[in-house]
Amino acid sequence: MNHLDEMTCLLYLERQLDRARAQEVSAHTQDCAACRTLMRALERESRLLTRAMLEEEEPLPARLAKFQERAKRSLQWIWGVAFGLAATGAYALYTGYIEPWQQQLEQAGFGGTSLLGLLVFQGAFWKGWQSMVTLLEVIALLTLAGFGAVLFRRRIRRGSALALVLAGFCAALVLPAPVLASETRRGENIAVSHDETVKGDIFLMGNRVRVDGTVDGDVFIFSHDANVTGHVTGDVIAFAHTLRIGGQVDGNIRAAVNTLTVTGSVGKNALTFADYANLDPTGKIGGSVTAFVESLNVDGKLGRDMLIFSKHLGISGTVGGGIQAKGGTFSIGATGEVDGPVRFEGEVAPEVSPGAKLASPVEYKKWEHKRSYRDSGYYIWQVIWSAAYILFGLVLFALMPEFSQEAVKSAEQYGAAAGLGVLVGFGLPIAAVIACFTVVGLFIGVSTFFLWYGALYFGQVIVGALVGQWIMGRTSELWPLIGRMAVGFIVLRLCTMIPHVGFWVKYGAAFWGIGAISLAVYRRLQPVIAPGMPSPPPLPPNTTVGGVQPA
Amino acid sequence: MSAPGTTIPTEAITRAKAGDAEAWGELYREYAPAIFRFCRRALPTREDAEDATTEIFMKLRDKLVQYDQSRSFSAWLYKVAANHCWDTLRRRKIRQDKETEDVDKVPLEHPDANQLERLIEQRTSEEVRKALDKLGGRARMALVMRYYSDMSYDEIADALGVRRAFVGVVLLRARHELRQALERTSALAAGGTS
């Protein structure tokens, strides 16, 4: 007699055979003991499998029991409160810091643009962006992308979300279609000769750079000594040791240099980060000057206003607008002339020659180095900042619960976290600056810097959570951890208010936190060797097909 | 449906579909343990199972309005869970693709029933679960779908993306893999005690 094969037996038991075949199998098993035994064994195997799988040897984890709460009580209101607080914080920040600055800038003749817009989007680093977006548009774009990612988080996988964000960044980069230089010249001594005319932008990289001819576009200079004696119809953007503008620049000057000297004429504005900057008697700048310098002397003619942060500022020439200055010393010589209001905030009272022609007397405000601890506003701001930090931490902990917990655990490795914190805390901004100097890495550099800046804050939140755990005990659950973070952060914040010590506490915590975050990121990037096997249940049930197994 | 509670909370489902958070909480309390166990059997680690349970219920909450109440709620729930777990395994590329749909190569022998009986006779549930953990993704997934959540061959075929006729083959091969794992465990135990 031919026996039934195992497949047929299984399909028969599972009622997957058609009626005719099932009847055949049934008839066969009436007569064949071997096939009957096989059927019985397979059936017992099925029962064994079902029993083994249905046994509840592991209760539902506490973490999952919490989902009931999440499901029962929608947390929409928390987000409402969070956004409300965030809006309040943003408003406080705007009215407390940004608006006064904006007003000062407007008074100094930089109306119509924000400080950030002035320094960032109209600065040399963002050449080509200036016609595109404002900072607010970028923030709005990213916020929109963030909201989109949150809204569709259940429909898109994590990789897709990341891709979406990256695509958003890429789109933001592509949309402005940045202005590119049409020509690049490299060498020891580079020159645009006297009789030469360059159409379009030009990059000049060399030890010595001269522009004696005409450039019908922008000039980008990376050099030790640079001299512009010719005619530039666009802007001059320079990273150099010494930059001398002896010719005619119709656009703006944007320079990060050691020494800047203007003996020629500049049609629009000048923005400079320099040790020494001079507007010689023959020099002329049609627009405004924004300068972060050690020493600035204005002996020539300036069309509009000045916003200056300097150690020494001297005016012997003519300023068509007002002056807003902060720094060490300020003097106006006998030949000096200022047609607008002059405000100076510094350590020493300004020296104004009796012969100087001023539209109004200099307004002087002595610099206050220390914030008054008696000022109630100080404490209000401390509360606002603490709330903002806790809110920031709450959002990050809620968005990245596992990563946050890993970072807090990493912070407990004091040596590694502190060491890595110093390394990353100092190394990352340096790397960002280096990236910025390479035009290709500009976006990466700026992004890295913002990332670092954000990590400084997140780091304090992480250390706050650790301090909270010291006080209230460890926890591995999210909301208790957030509670500990809030308590710990308040304690940390109080420590930062201690005179003389507070500064070190604040930045020590920030760098420690950065180290912990870096450690957590590092661990995440480590490849997983193999998925771990689940641990055996604590009490084996000892059940068998035949009943309870004898001990 | 064998795993979760036998009573189907129709009223709770209706209320949950209408957006009643309390009713959704009831459904969660009723079914979360069973779904967690399903995930625990189907996925490699406890952490995976925990994450998957949360994600499955998030999906379910979104999809609840699509649920047709004339059909079994738990069957629908297990279908979502099975798809999610299989997706998880597939994404990690730990799915076992060594099996083919070549039905001709299915072993059609008649095994020694007594030997099979001996093999399973003294096995504890714990031993079986340990052996299950050693199986490939597809084999384990198939056994869990069939013998834990009592899914039909059609549903299993749909979840695994195979032809219905091939489901029996997958299940039989999975049983063979399981027997080999149990035999290895026995051999190890015998070696350890000798």
Image: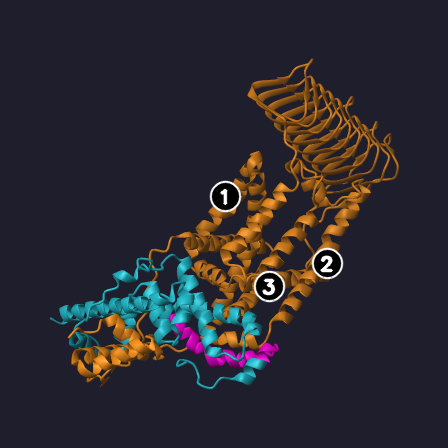
Magenta range is B15-40
Query: Where residue A443 sits: x, y (%)?
Result: 58, 41
Disc 1 to disc 2, how far (Cα)? 33 Å
Residue A91 is tagged as 2
Q: Mark 1 points at which residue?
A: A427
Q: Which of marks 1 and 2 is nearer the N terminus?
A: 2
What is the chain identity of the residue bearing mark 3?
Answer: A
Task: Answer whether labels 3 and 1 touch (C-beta < 8 Å).
Answer: no
Chain B pictured colour: cyan
Task: Please give the name of the residue rendered at 87% of the width and 29% of the height, measured from the top-left corner.
Answer: A355
Q: In which quarter of the image is residue A244?
A: top right
- Badge 1 marks a residue whose secondary structure is helix
Residue A65: say if magenta.
no
Please indicate whether residue A362 sits to the left or right of residue A429 in the image. right
Question: Which amino acid, by three-letter code, is at mark 2?
Answer: Tyr
State which quarter of the image contains the C terminus of chain B.
bottom left
- Are labels 3 and 2 on one chain? yes
State which quarter of the image contains the N terminus of chain B.
bottom left
Label 1 packing within 10 angstroms: few (<14), some (14-19), many (20+): few
Q: Which of marks 3 and 1 is nearer the N terminus?
A: 3
